Amino acid sequence: MASLGTLSVDIGARTNKFAQGLADAQAKAASFASGVGKVFAGIQISNMVDRAAQSVMSLGKQIIDLAANAELMVAEFETLTGNIGLGATVFNDLERFAARTSFNLQSAAESASMLLGKGVQQAELIPTMQMLGDLARGNSERLGFLAKAYTDVQAKGKLMAQEQNQFAENGINLFELLSKTTGKNTAELMAMREAGQITFQMVQEGLIAATAQGGKFFGFMQKANATFIGQWNSLMENIQSIGRAIGEMILPYLKDIVGEANKLLDAFNQLPNKAEFLSKILQASMN
């Protein structure tokens, strides 16, 4: 029979071994957890680097797109004005117009192209945009509709029912405005319109008066730009303006690279047997 002392020693030894085993298990668990943590940390760092690289590439593409679109707009305005030097001037004017209003550059450029294409002179473009912008109450879609109605009246030289309805659909009661500049009432203006006697100049004068100081729509773009949406648009336009400036510095180098690549591809496409040529290149690369 074992003595109490012997049992105590034996239990102590067993307890020590159990404790040691438990400590070893804990150490291994901690080591495993540390290893897993390092793996996940490595994955997270890799994902962060990947996302950062993608963000940089996306930003670079956006900057290049901004500059490329600006270059295309300048070329379009050169064609519409018939003057190479005026293309950049028109673009710069519109860029400043967009930055101080609730309109973005794209919508402003589309309306400007319509106005120039229908005969509005470059010197009158921004004042006309200002007038139509106030009438549109800061709404880009409405600006486009009003620019079309305005240029349609200009092209016809007189107000007709179709254009009057276009103005009315966008919240502009032309007879109300014309009554203030002509002194005629609605019935008289209706008769004049049917007789083709309301000229483009009369419509233009009515719209100018409505957007001048004291007019119904005076300063509406300024009011719209003072709103959060207007200020946010100005912020975005100013940031994009910086992006375009950076892109304009990069674009010439990219054009050279793309130009050389196109020369090589054009030469390849002129080959009588492209498949045979590619086969020879592949064979040579494998030897």
Image: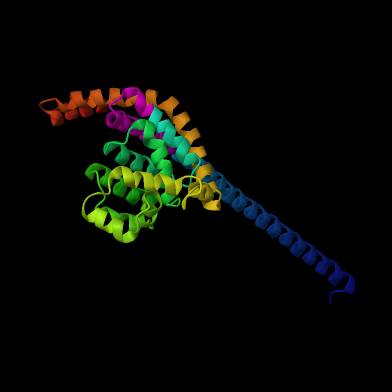
In front of the other: 58 or 242: 242
Res. 77 in view: yes
- The residue closer to the viewer here, 216 or 250, is 216
State the image coordinates of residue 233 (x, y, percent, origin top left): 50, 46
Q: Which residues are magenta?
A: 60-88
Q: Is residue 262 magenta?
A: no
Quadrant where the C terminus is found in the figure: top left
Q: Residue 234: give x, y in percent of width and height.
A: 52, 43
For the stretch drawn in magenta, the main secondary structure is helix
| 19 sits to left or right of 109 | right
Q: Is residue 50 above or below residue 165?
A: above
| Residue drawn 19% across the image and 29% down it | 278
Foreground of the two, 53 or 122: 122
Give the farthest residue toward the bottom. Answer: 1
Relative to 277, say whether 169 is above or below: below
Residue 60: in sight, yes or no? no
Question: Horizontal placement of 172 versus 236: left or right?
Answer: left
Image quarter in which the N terminus is found: bottom right
- Is 106 in front, or is 163? 163
